Structure formats: structure tokens, C-alpha cells
Amino acid sequence: MAPSNASEDRAVMLTDLGCFRATVAHERPARILYSGGFVADLHARVVDHIGTDDIAGHYGMYQPAHLAPRRPDGLAPIDYSPYWEGQDLPEGTTFDAYGVAMVPSGYYHFWGYVSPLRNATDISELENYPIDDMRDFDFSHLPAVTEQAHAEGRVVVAFVGHMYETAWQIRGLEQFLTDTIERPSWAECLLERLAEQNTVRALAYAAAGADVLHCGDDVATQAASMFSPALWRRLMHSRWARIWEAAKAINPGIRIWYHSDGNITDLVDDLVDAGLDILNPLQPECLDTDEIHRRHGSHLTFDGTIGTQSTMPFGTPDDVRARVREVIGKYGRSGGLMIAPTHVLEPEVPLGNIDALFEACREYGTFE
């Protein structure tokens, strides 16, 4: 075996990949990774402000590579038009990959949803609703994508999918929530069908050497979980746990990243027990990040923590810098922290606060 080259090892440590590996291993990285996103209006003003459309490059953001399967030639997209015959939908309506109608809300990145199975009267309609079978898709190119990204010092991320969010969008929010109580077999039918497809993706991404599996569902309000613990564990959590276990059996080094807005404090123990590695976004306005860190800080990595309902829109640049310094001091000096606003930044966020956020990440989060 050739001896290790110290200069090459150091070069790897300074890459996004090296910093990520140290972060999730709870070792001090050379620098803390950070990122952020913007609604279209703010994105355009940031581009004008900095003089380039390469916002991530300008601010030095973390930029992972992303894996995605290919639809084979000859495999036509599902035709969902029969579900919408005779329906009067607003101008500008589009349809997502599951046939859900997305109605413009007139408010930035938000949509109104019209659900194709909102009027279902029999479980067979849920059983027979067409969903792409991911086993028919092409994943063969993914190992090469991973190899190239790693050679470039980049982290490889793959989005597995949602479950609860996709299920309610297909069925209708009120209808799906009612199903969980009055017709649980209906709720389980959709969730299990989606879990099966998420499993196909997860196993393929794990086999391709992905570093991170992105998963998640918004399952909490600002105050608390939307579901009783028993219902959450039976319907959603058990399925995610099964997917994560299967992926880690193939690739023990893969990291599980889970997103839910809101106060998910009561769900974190379950998620960690199931194999969660990275929690996003940790909204400081509605949960106690200190308490979660006390319970799980030795093994759970935080991704987020910068409030988009408080510090970013309503603070001063000094407030932003102070918040960045605070979270690094509390959660990130020994790894375990990636910094980001807790959601996409909205138009009311001052440009000076954006500059301050990323300047502070570099200033306080660079250790070598």
C-alpha cells in the first residue's frame, strides 16, 4: 500500500466532501458547510446585488451533486388526463409527477392543490391509482456520477421522496386525515404504495454510493406534531425506519437526512432510534434546539437553525451575525452542524442580512 500523502489528505479535508464527512462524524471540520435558497423575486434582487447569477459560488455555499434515475426510452409518462376530464381548473394550473393539480396561489412559491382522489368512494380507487414503478427506471449511470462527484470533492445527495405529503396531495388533505381515523386501511394503502417506490430509489442510491438520502414530510405545526405518537409510529415512522434500515444494510456509511417544518420535538427520539443522522430545519421559533442538542447532540447533525420567521427578515445584520456565531458556538465546534435558513428566504429579507449570514458563516465557521 502506498504511504499516505499528507498534502493530499489535507486537500481532501478542505473539500465539501471532507468537511461533510468530518461534520457527520462529529469531528471538527476545516469549515462549516452552509447554504440557502431564495424565492424568485429575492433571487433576482440578489443577482443584481452581487453582479452574478452564481449565487452559491459567490457566497461560498455548499453545493452537493444530486442523483436521479432516468426514464427509459419508450416508457411514456403516465396519462392522468382521465382524472381531470370535465374539471374546471384555473388558468396556469400544472400537474405534478403524481397527477396532482397545482393551482397558482399568487404568493411566491406556494401552490393550491386539487387532489385527483378527493372524491374516491372505494379503496380500489386508491389501489389502482397509477403511480410510476421505479423498478422500470434506469439507475445504471449513478455509480459513475458518484465517482466523478467524489473525485471533485463533492457530496452526493439523493432525494428518496415524500410519503405523507404525497399521499395527502393525491387523496386530499382533509380526506387523508379523516382516512387515518375512520378508514385507516385507505391511508395505509397509499402510504405503502409510496413506501415501496421510495424503497426502490433508496436501495439504488445506496448501492450507487450516495452520501446522503434526503427524506421527509411536514408532519408538525408550529405548536406540535400533527399526529398522536401511536398513529405517527404506525403509519409514517415504521415505513421510514424500514427504508432507512434497508439502505444502511447496503451502504452502512450512508447518512439519513430528514426534513419536517414545525415543532417535531416529540418525534426526534423515534427518528434517531430509526437511524436518523441529519435533522432539518430546526426552526428556532417553535422548538428548543438546545434541548434537542442536549439529548442527541453527540450523534445527530443539525442542518438549518437560522430563523426565517425571525432573524433573517426582522433582525439587523448584527443580529444575523450574532445568531450564526451562537449556533456555531453551541452546536458546531466539534462537528454536527450545517448552517442554513430554515426555509427558502422570502422577499422581505434585507440584502444586508443575506450578506451578513454568509460572511458570518465564513468568519466564525472556518477552523483551518
Image (tube, grey):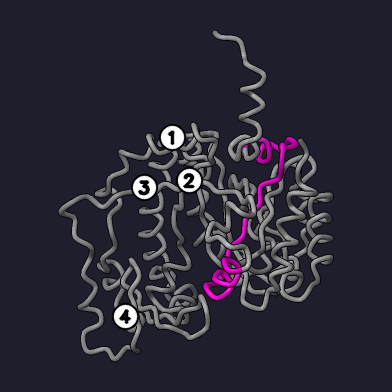
Which residues fall within the magenta stretch? 21-48
Residue 289 position in % (x across, y down)? 77, 59
Give the secondary structure at mark 3: helix
Q: Is residue 243 visible?
A: no
Give yes or no for residue 348 being in the magenta stretch.
no
Which quadrant of the structure image shows residue 147? top left
Q: Nearer the viewer, mark 4 or mark 2?
A: 2
Q: Nearer the viewer, residue 99 or 185?
A: 99
Q: Contact, CB < 8 Å: mark 1 with mark 3?
A: no
* 93 relative to 47 in the view: left or right: left
User: Label 2 to label 3, Cα distance in Å?
Assistant: 20 Å
Q: Which residue is mark 4?
A: 120
Q: Which residue is mark 1?
A: 148
Q: Which residue is mark 2?
A: 65
Q: Contact, CB < 8 Å: mark 3 with mark 4?
A: no
Ranked by sequence position, the earlier of labels 4 and 2 is: 2
Give the secondary structure at mark 1: helix
Q: Contact, CB < 8 Å: mark 1 with mark 2?
A: yes
The type of residue carrying mark 1 is Gln
Examine the rendered structure and indicate whether residue 297 appears above or below residue 104.
above
Q: Is residue 160 visible?
A: yes
The type of residue carrying mark 4 is Ala
Q: Contact, CB < 8 Å: mark 4 with mark 2?
A: no
Query: Which residue in the rendered view is the most extreme toward the front?
Result: 51
Residue 180 position in % (x across, y down)? 48, 72
Please state, as top left, top right, bottom left or bottom right, where the N terminus lies in the image: top right
Q: Tag 3: Cα neighbours inside 10 Å, few (<14), some, or many (≥20)?
A: some
Give the secondary structure at mark 2: strand
